[in-house]
Each structure stands twice: as structure tokens, then as C-alpha cells.
Image (spheres, rainbow, N blue to C red):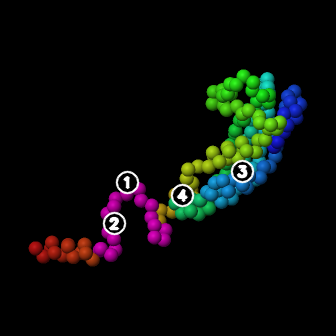
Amino acid sequence: MKWSIEQLKSFKLKGLTIDEEVNVEELKERNPDIREITPVHVTGETSFHGNKVTFHLTVKGKMVLPCANTLEDVDFPFVIRPMETFVLEANTSGVDFEVEDEEIHQVSGNTVDLVPYIKENILLEIPIRVVKYSSESDEMPKKSGNGWEVITKEQPKEKVDPRMAGLADFFNKENEDS
């Protein structure tokens, strides 16, 4: 996924179509929440506008992330559609390029390498938290486990600790005697 500026200029009239698998295993080192990640399938096309080339990409893959409640593995398939624009000739005006919500990258050296931008977009796609649902049905995730339970603000906190249940009975008997 690397092209020289001259190669890209040769595609100016006929365009460039991308259809490749990219290994992004090293993302596991950059983000410890990623337990596994498959090679991603990158497809796309280019468009040329003057001395700029824009890559319209679709990146599909799957990563395994920890469940926010139980830390069990959760498969997280993703499809992202980044658009990356590069200026193929040196910027002699000293003006930084930025058009609307689109960042335009200045080419350093003689090559354009899309892999770092693909990795960056994958890292941005990781959700803040994922929750594992039951595979048999669309049930909500577990509400309790060995030594833990999920509580919400709506739930009443009327549960009596089993160790204190006898004490509650003691006060009830005392009120009945008087």
C-alpha cells in the first residue's frame, strides 16, 4: 500500500483501484485492549484534483476486545470508510492545507504509504466499551456473577446483607414485645 509520487501521477488519467489485505497485528502492541485483530481488507479508489490525490477507502476487519462487565472476549467487526488526501508536490507557499473537515497530508519523501493512516483510523474506531451479549439470543448481558453484580440507579437498595438478617429480626422482635 505504498506508491511513489511518479507511480501515482501515472494513474492520474485511468485512476487507481485498491483491493488488498493488510496485516495490522502491531496494533495489539499500541492498544492493549485489542486482544486479536484479523488482517483487514482494504478496497477503494483514487481521485485526482490538481496536485492532490484523494483515497476513498473501505476498511473491513474484526478485532477481539474485552467485555466492559466481565472481561470476556467480544468479537467486534468493523467497517470504516476513511478518506485521505495527499499533496503530491511540495508546498512552497508555507500555508497548511485543511479544507472543511478534511485534513490534507503533505507527502514527506517520495512515497505515499497508506498503512499508517489505515492503522490510525482503526484505532479511532475502537469503542469506549463493549458488552458481550448471549450468543443464543439477544438477551442482555449477565447482571451478576461470582462475587459481583451490576447495579443501576433505578434499582432499590433494599437488599439486606445475609450476615445482618438476624440483627434485623432482633429489632423486629423487640418492637413486638413493647
Mark earlier in primary sequence (1, 4): 4
Q: Which residues are magenta?
A: 145-165
Q: Nearer the viewer, mark 3 or mark 1?
A: 3
Give the left or right position of residue 155, taking residue 86 as reference. left
Percent coordinates x, y for residue 28 in the rendering: 68, 56
156 lies above or below 18: below
Mark earlier in primary sequence (4, 3): 3
**Quadrant the N terminus occupies:** top right
Q: CA distance from mark 4 to mark 3?
A: 21 Å
65 lies above or below 95: below
Would you name the residue on which mark 2 appears?
159
Please say whether residue 64 is visible from this viewpoint: no
Q: Which residue is the extreme one toward the left? A: 178
Q: Secondary structure at mark 4?
A: loop
Would you name the residue on which mark 3 appears?
61
In terms of image quadrants, where is residue 99? Answer: top right
Q: Amino acid at mark 1?
A: Glu
Q: Amino acid at mark 4?
A: Ala
Q: Secondary structure at mark 2?
A: loop
Percent coordinates x, y for residue 18 in the rendering: 82, 40
User: Magenta segment: does it hold 37?
Assistant: no
Q: CA distance from mark 1 to mark 2?
A: 14 Å
Report the magenta stretch's main SS: loop
Q: Nearer the viewer, mark 2 or mark 4?
A: 4
Query: What label sits on residue 68 in the rendered view?
Result: 4
Q: Nearer the viewer, mark 3 or mark 2?
A: 3
